[in-house]
Amino acid sequence: MKRMFFGLLFLAAGLSLCGYLVHRYYQRARTTVPVADSGGYRPMNEWQKSISLDTRTDYTRQEVEQAMEKLRQEERRQKPEEGRN
């Protein structure tokens, strides 16, 4: 009888300690979250609407070659053969 009493007392103390430690852990986790700041960013819909397409068709040969060269440089920079991007 005496042994059972001390066993139950030990179990209750262990569970209480475990509950206290869990409670303390979650209290700390809650206070370390920083306040989010939008930083002046616009919503995605607004940002996408602000992009305008270039519908010109009267490009000179030199402008076309420059644009193609920029495209090739960007493709080389991203290295698609390595699986990047």
Image (cartoon, rainbow, N blue to C red):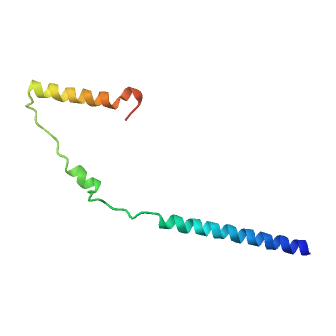
Q: Position of residue 72 (x, y in %)?
A: 25, 26
In what quadrant of the picture does the C terminus appear?
top left
Residue at image point 36% right, 29% down: 80
Residue at image point 59% right, 68% down: 24
In what quadrant of the picture does the N terminus appear?
bottom right
Q: Give the number of callouts.
A: 0
Q: Position of residue 83 (x, y in %)?
A: 41, 31
Residue at image point 72% right, 69% down: 15
Relative height, residue 55 to residue 47 (above, below): above
Q: Position of residue 30 (x, y in %)?
A: 50, 66
User: Foreground: 21 or 69?
Assistant: 21
Seen in the image, is 10 located left or right of residue 60? Answer: right
Seen in the image, is 26 located left or right of residue 65? Answer: right
Residue at image point 89% right, 71% down: 3
Q: Position of residue 27 (x, y in %)?
A: 54, 69
Relative height, residue 67 to residue 34 (above, below): above
